[in-house]
Image: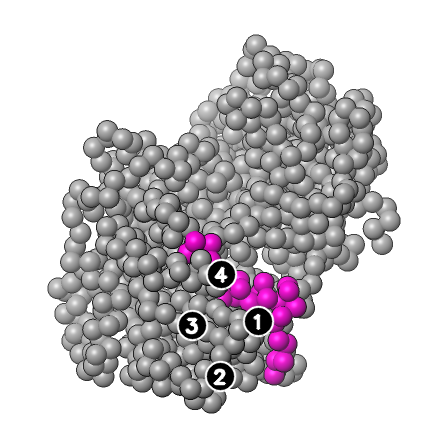
Amino acid sequence: MGTPAAGSPGRIPDLLVIGAGLAGLMAAQTGADAGLSVRVVAKGMGATHWAAGTVDVLGYLPTDDTPVHHPLEAVERLPEDHPYRRVGGAPRVARGLARFQELTQALKLPYVAREDGQNWWLPSPAGAPRPAYLAPQAQARGDLERKEPLLIVGFAGLRDFYPRLIAENLARQGIQARAASLPLNLLTPRRDVNTVQLARTLDRPDPVERLGRELRALARPGERIGLPAILGLERHLWTWHRLEAITEAPVFEIPTLPPSVPGIRLFQAWQRHLLAQGVRVEMGMAAIGFQAAGDRILWVETESAARPLRHRAGRFVLATGGILGGGIAAGPDGPAREVVFGLPLAVPTERRHWFRPRFLDPAGHPLFQGGVAVDPALRPVDPRTGQTIYTNLHAAGEILAGTDSIRERSLEGIALATGAAILPAAASP
Amino acid sequence: MFTTSWHSVNLTANECIKCNICTSYCPVAEVTDRFPGPKYAGPQSERFRENGQPHSPDRSVDYCSGCRVCNEVCPTGVRIAEINARARAQMVAEHGIPLRNRLLGRNELLGRLGSLAPHLANRSLHNPVSRLLAEKVMGIARHAPLPRWSETGTLHHWLRRTAAHRRRAERKVVYFHGCATQYYEPFVGQAAVLVLEHLGYQVIVPPQNCCGLPLLSNGEFEAAERYHRGNVARLAGFAWAGYPIVGTSTSCTLTLKEEAPELLDRTDSGTLALKQATWDIFEFLRERAQAGELPTDFRPLGTDAEPLVLPYHAPCQYRAHRVGKPALEILSWIPGVAVRESLARCCGIAGTYGYKAEKYTIAMDVGQELFDFVRSQGPGVRLTACDSETCRWQLEHGTGIPSRHPIEVLAAAYGLYDLEGRRPVVE
């Protein structure tokens, strides 16, 4: 809970960020770091609440099904219009990630990279190894390249985590794993809870002690204990360390089906951190329109109960997400459109060219590779002419063209790298 | 009965992607098994409430408090709280409504009756025996923070008494006070009138009805519609004439802006004019500030060394306006005030929800997050601030610390109002 920065009547912020996913938060942080006054408006909670809570930088190249081991080294093999190349390649990507890591230290939710610069291979909720570049410490403990056998523990009646599925799948891939299940009433008297509610329960000492004792009895010597990612919401590090202390075994988290506790932890801690720097993150505010004079945006309007609310600012960042995040929408008969500024999109206009015939086509679908094309300062351009459209509008994250980030496993990496690159060199101190 | 039509509210159920973010933030689902969460009770159950389907799959939607936190966090714009309100109306139409809910929905009637003899009304209601009886017979929780009728007259009494001192000016604004200000807390209305006059406005306070929200929340849509028509008849003329209609009760103004038109499917020009003319008072003041017209002749309410530490909670009904937290912004401009922003989701009371015996404990459990926040601000906290009346009563009930409407704080900063005694400095 923070104290708002002292303002004065009628003060116009330097920077308005639209969207509160990782790209929007990183853009806001970058503005605040540069001493700008910043405000964030968002329609609802962002992709942090859906995703696994890791930072995936690059798992696969667009044209290749073999996994990438060194994401930063592979950046130069991406097409030129890829957002990583747009912001200046591997060094700029690394700079955004470094700032993020430093920040997560301050948030007491440290994210760690492998020392050799390779991707981690971590168990997915289905028991498949998945590549991730930065992982919260508690997820990194589940590194599948280490040899200690795994004990995957779930809770009977918890709908979003299936330990047997995970263990069996891992075992089929040659990873030594077994499953166990504990009763839900070990943690809560409730019959029907989701992972976030359980995480709040595990912010309290008593349930942590009870869980620790049961786990200690279950685990065999040398095993690592994998749990659903519910180890505390506000006091995650404390909960996790306490469980490792009681069990005297490595304990790790496996992401669950959404909502994502690791993502929500990060979002909430970051939101509080921004608020302490005077940056408000306003929820429930859907940007629906704007006013421009020539090549400058004057204000953005958000929907409210009675009348559009005007947000003036010196500079604007569009971080509303792609198709899933709602930054790009398409009606049943219309073309895909960018919802706030009506920016031209680099997407095949005709609907029949959006998708390839096979759902899991290895080449992906053109629609998902489309988005807003940008210049090197991340300002949207007309994809046909290359002309910059507005001089004070930048775009970051999943809305950008040139990437199919879910296939590439680059969603968070792009969000952080582009969110950190929204300020032209002149505006940075 | 009121027929629910294929209206945009219900259609937003199709936008649900089942991400369960709403369930994770729902303050009610977090503390009780009786409410399975917004996704389940709202968009999911909506599939069974389609035209031609007989009824809701179960009655759990009755445990939705209507706080609208789900709408606030939904990434795809599903109008979950409104879907739930309509589902409750359908339940009331099918199964009837308990006398208790009928009574709680009629805030205006209760206010008016009690104000005939407020001393007597307060003594008859506010004693342990009556409250126990009310719980046993009616199901009104005996510890719930029911308000006291004003014993110094209603807001309209004060306006009549001070008519000669009221500012007359070319610029005019209409004040919508709501039932609580009229009958229980006329001083909030006094503070509002004084501040608006300080900005140079003449304040018109026309006769008005209850906004209808308590009836909407309790599923009595027909009765709510009668109130709403009354307000349109009495206020739309001012809206057409171009006067802003400004309110201090965040849930009343939300109802005029959005809830009544949307839930009751009213698209007449009077409803629309009223919707577009209505402002929360701080939303209005912030707009004035942006135009450079908010006086800044603030007197400090504390010192730099010893500021007035003011925990502020923006009620969920305020956040549902989607205008940000203008009261927080303006209070932070007052020298000597250290505003501490609550990020708690809901105080729990949710209008009449926490008054109901079977829901009182849920409401208190929900409010714990807010009560803990206030306590965490240290023992020196003398006052809290919140824009909504029932929330202030719940805040006082949960923390034992007096609570004020931000407009009272602002009026005090302009030197017009006694924040301790809750009365104008000059009558």
| Disc 1 residue type (three-letter) | Leu
Specify whether A217 is left or right of A420.
left
Q: Which residue is mark 3?
A: B204
Write down the region rendered in magenta: B273-299
Please tell me whether mark 1 sits on a helix, a strand or a loop: helix
| Crowdedness near tag 3: few (<14), some (14–19) or many (≥20) residues, C-alpha within 10 Å | some
- Badge nearest the viewer, 1 or 2: 2
Of badges 4 and 1, the one in the foreground is: 4
Determine the residue positioned at 53% across, 73% down.
B170
Q: Which residue is mark 1?
A: B331
- How far across and down, in percent of the image, does residue B184 sit? 32, 75
Q: Say which residue appears at 78% left-offset and 22% top-offset.
A: A79
Q: Which residue is mark 2?
A: B417
Closer to the eye: label 3 or 4: 4
- Gap between marks 4 and 2 measured at Cα: 29 Å
Identify the element where label 3 is drawn.
strand
> Considering only order in the chain, which callout, 4 or 3, is on the residue closer to the N terminus?
3
Q: Is residue A222 above or below residue B98?
A: above
Q: Amino acid at mark 4?
A: Gly
Q: Is residue A293 above or below residue B240?
A: above
Q: Which of disc 1 and disc 3 is earlier in sequence?
A: 3
